[in-house]
Image (cartoon, rainbow, N blue to C red):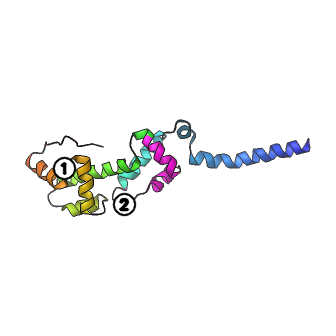
Amino acid sequence: MIGQIIRQVSNEDHRRHEAPHASRVNPPAAAATGVLAPWQERRAREIMQARLATRLTIADVARECRLTPSYFAKAFRRTTGMSPHQYLTGLRVQEAKSLLLSPTLSLAEIAIICGFGDQSYFTRVFTRFVGTSPGAWRRARAQRPSVSFPHERTY
């Protein structure tokens, strides 16, 4: 009898100490469905937008959403239909497009401002996302502002 009571108290004490940590890492709503809770999705998007030009890692964003990096990456993909890296790259390309409309900034400056390592990498990524190089996109917009490209994605 006394042994049962000691085991029961011990088990309850153990559960009490586990519960706060478990709910902090994977909140119930997110854990049940495998997607981000609305506040987590909103926070992740805000962080990525605000820290576009910095070296941002999945771990940084996951920490702000109170999730592990691997769970965050999977839940972000389930929620948005794209990986966190794809989403961040899309934001960077969108920012680059707005900066390309200004003729005073060089492509190298735009690359750095948008968080790309260098102009060469910026050109490769931009071309993959938009379907044309940043220089060609800029020239086309300067000649006809309403020009769009067939493979262009928006975020």
Residue holding disc 1:
132
Q: Is residue 87 left or right of residue 108?
A: right
The relative height of residue 77 versus residue 101 in the rendered view (above or below) is above
Q: How many marks?
A: 2
Q: Position of residue 48 (x, y in %)?
A: 38, 52
- Would you call the spot at circle 2 few (<14 residues within 10 Å), some (14-19), or many (20 or more)? few
User: Magenta residues, as a range?
Assistant: 51-77
Please tell me the numbered disc located at residue 54.
2
Q: Is residue 132 left or right of residue 73?
A: left
Question: In the rendered view of the protein, which quadrant contains the N terminus?
Answer: top right
Give how far apart the Cα atoms at labels 2 and 1 are.
25 Å
Q: Residue at x 24, y 54 (%)?
A: 96
Q: Is residue 12 left or right of residue 87?
A: right
Label 2 residue SS:
loop
- Would you call the spot at circle 1 few (<14 residues within 10 Å), some (14-19), or many (20 or more)? some
The relative height of residue 56 versus residue 91 in the rendered view (above or below) is below
Indicate the amino acid at tag 1: Thr
Indicate the amino acid at tag 2: Thr
Residue contact between numbered discs 2 and 1, judged by CB atoms under 8 Å: no
Q: Position of residue 46 (x, y in %)?
A: 39, 49
Q: Residue at x 68, y 48 (%)?
A: 18
Q: Quadrant of residue 107?
A: bottom left
Q: Residue at x 21, y 55 (%)?
A: 99
Label 1 residue SS:
loop
Q: Position of residue 32 (x, y in %)?
A: 56, 36
Residue 56: within the magenta? yes
Of 17 and 108, nearer the camera is: 108
